[in-house]
Image (cartoon, rainbow, N blue to C red):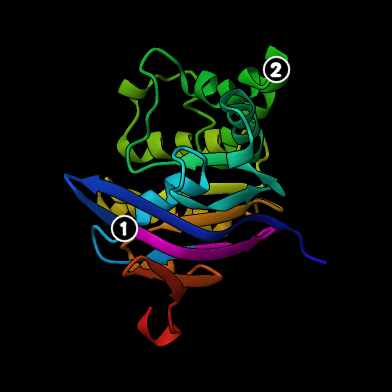
Amino acid sequence: MVDVVLSCSGLEKSYQDGSNSVKVLQGVELALEQGERIAIVGRSGSGKSTLLNLLGGLDTPTAGEVLVSHKSLSRMGERARSQWRNRQLGFVFQFHHLLPEFTALEAVAMPMRIGGEAKGVAQERAATLLDRVGLSQRVRHKPAALSGGERQRVAIARALANKPGCVLMDEPTGNLDPESAELVLNLIESIDWGDTAFIIVTHDPKIAEKMDRQLVLESGCLSDLPRALV
């Protein structure tokens, strides 16, 4: 039986706009299986990034529940949630969020070091991951010496450092030139990352059509996107 690595039920998110309550998400249901890759598409402002932040435990829902590896994020304290998130989830955003003082090797090793892994072991796996994303010659370089596409590939390697059950990507090619975006897309599609599942928020149909499933977020609800519209 295929394991469900991330799920949500009845997920809602509302914000206060003066005296009005604005509902961004309403009753979102999702189950992501081990190794599955899904794309979430939708118009700008539809709530895609909000949904990703809720699924990743970076924000709290107004109602509903998110389960990561069968544990409810909302039932954890902040410290326990941060530790569970570090072990079970990886994140890639539109901007790489690499710290300027760390080399590529140090950046990728950081999630493992935070999780208590020995420095040597963490750096050995970091070097392996950087090789897999085509950056074996750039491990000692800091972000300022890397191109935009190289920085994003470092961010992808970092997201996979702790062998997470799921990697959440928010417009991973949105800040790249076409050539770099194509390299990142090929990386996401072609490399076998084992049992790790991926959720990719994207406006790029080239990315969406290569995923196992395509979902659309519209009027606060998440539903399957017909293949003909991908």
Q: How crowded is mark 2: few (under 14 residues within 10 Å), some or many (20 or more)?
A: few
Q: From the viewer's side, name the closer residue of 72 and 213.
A: 72
Residue 36 among magenta residues: yes
**Picture layout, residue 87 above or below residue 79:** below
- Look at the numbered disc 2 and give the secondary structure of its residue: loop
Residue extending furthest toward the bottom: 228
Locate the N terminus and report the quarter of the image it occupies: bottom right
Q: Which residue is drawn at 43% across and 78% down?
A: 225
- Report the disc number at residue 23: 1
- Report the disc number at residue 209: none
Query: Of discs 1 and 2, which sits in the foreground?
Result: 1
Q: Provide the residue span drawn in magenta.
A: 24-38
Residue 62 among magenta residues: no
Q: Residues within 10 Å of mark 1 (few under 14, many from 20)?
A: some
**Picture layout, residue 125 above or below residue 18:** above
Q: Residue at x 42, y 53 (%)?
A: 51
Q: Where is residue 20 in the image (x, y as percent from the top left)?
A: 20, 52
Task: State the image quarter where residue 78 is shown.
Answer: top right
Q: Where is residue 182 in the image (x, y as percent from the top left)?
A: 37, 56
Mark 1 belongs to which amino acid?
Lys
Q: Where is residue 62 in the image (x, y as percent from the top left)?
A: 43, 49
Locate the C terminus and report the quarter of the image it occupies: bottom left
- Look at the numbered disc 1 and give the secondary structure of its residue: strand
Q: Which residue does the numbered mark 2 point to in the structure image?
A: 116
Q: Distance between the residues labelled 1 and 2?
A: 40 Å
Residue extending furthest toward the left: 18
* Residue 38 as seen in the image, left or right of residue 176: right
Mark 2 belongs to which amino acid?
Gly
